[in-house]
Image (cartoon, rainbow, N blue to C red):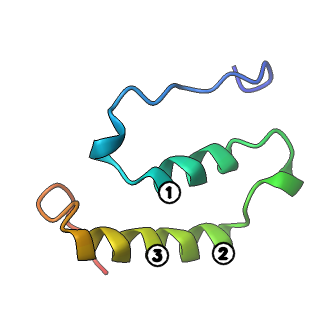
């Protein structure tokens, strides 16, 4: 599937996850390594997404994050 450029679709409505998370996931699916974020960049962006979600009350009960 990957070699044909196919990726899973996001079937859950956007209101159930942060739009920036979808963007990050789609960037990680880039066809060449040069366009994909590095692991360090992914961690920084995930930290920002989680912090923003915490401020907005998202994921409070859904996910129990250790940080």
At label 3, counting other C-alpha atoms closer than 10 Å, the crowd grade (few under 14, some 14-19, many 20 or more) is: few
- Going from the N terminus, do you reach mark 2 or mark 1 first? 1
Instruction: State if disc 3 and disc 2 touch (CB < 8 Å).
Output: no
- Note whether 53 is above or below 23 in the view shown: below
The CA span between labels 2 and 3 is: 13 Å
At label 2, counting other C-alpha atoms closer than 10 Å, the crowd grade (few under 14, some 14-19, many 20 or more) is: few
- Note whether 40 is above or below 27 in the view shown: below
Q: Nearer the viewer, residue 60 or 4?
A: 60
Secondary structure of the residue carrying tag 3 is helix
The CA span between labels 3 and 1 is: 10 Å
At label 1, counting other C-alpha atoms closer than 10 Å, the crowd grade (few under 14, some 14-19, many 20 or more) is: few
Q: Which mark is residue 40?
A: 2
Instruction: State if disc 1 and disc 2 touch (CB < 8 Å).
Output: no
Viewer-side label of 2, 3: 3
- Going from the N terminus, do you reach mark 3 or mark 1 first? 1
Instruction: State if disc 1 and disc 3 touch (CB < 8 Å).
Output: yes
Secondary structure of the residue carrying tag 1 is helix
**Rendering coords of residue 15 (x, y %):** 29, 44
């Amino acid at each position: 599937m990957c070699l044909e450029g196919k990726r899973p679709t996001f079937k859950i409505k956007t209101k159930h996850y942060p739009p920036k998370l979808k963007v990050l996931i789609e960037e990680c699916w880039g066809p060449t390594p040069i366009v994909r974020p590095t692991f360090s960049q992914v961690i920084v962006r995930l930290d920002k997404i989680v912090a923003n979600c915490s401020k907005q009350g998202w994921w409070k009960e859904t996910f129990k994050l250790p940080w």
